Amino acid sequence: MIDTNPDKAYYGYNHVQKANEELAIDILLVTDELFRNSHVTTRKKYVDLVESVQNNGGKVYIFSSLHVSGTQLQQVSGVAAILRYPLPDIDQLETDAIYHSSDGDDTDDDINSPNPS
């Protein structure tokens, strides 16, 4: 998948979550280790991600951290997604969003204008 169409593979929670928001996930790959995390909030966010992908028609595969495939997946964040269609580079989208938000109307004419007496 990475060799043939790298735009259809995402790794890391933030990128995968963003792809999920776009309803682009066809297959979600998760290690079981994420569901055994000592932080309840971390476990909950991965359970929510799995449920959301399933509700949106995606398939979910959970890999054992005792198997070589689970170990390899854990080395690249423990979560990955194969997308239904390629998405633009998320890092580029985030950069564009920051640029556009700083390009907004941040002129504070009212604050700097003198008060009429």
Image (cartoon, rainbow, N blue to C red):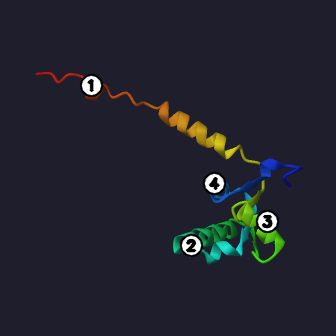
Residue 42 in the figure: left or right of residue 104: right
**Residue 31 quadrant:** bottom right
Q: Quick check: 100 above or below 5? A: above
Please tell me the numbered disc located at residue 44: 2
Which sits in the foreground, 19 or 30?
Answer: 30
**Residue 13 quadrant:** bottom right
Please tell me the numbered disc located at residue 112: 1
**Amino acid type, residue under disc 3 in the picture:** Gln
**Amino acid type, residue under disc 1 in the picture:** Asn
Q: Quick check: 84 above or below 93? A: below
| Image coordinates for residue 27, horizontal then vertical, percent | 77, 64
Please tell me the numbered disc located at residue 72: 3
Which one is closest to the eye, mark 3 or mark 2?
A: 3
Q: Of the residues under marks 2 and 1, which one precedes in the sequence?
A: 2
Q: Which residue is mark 4?
A: 18
Disc 3 to disc 4, C-alpha distance: 22 Å
Mark 2 element type:
helix
Residue positioned 50% across, 36% down in the render:
101
**Amino acid type, residue under disc 2 in the picture:** Lys
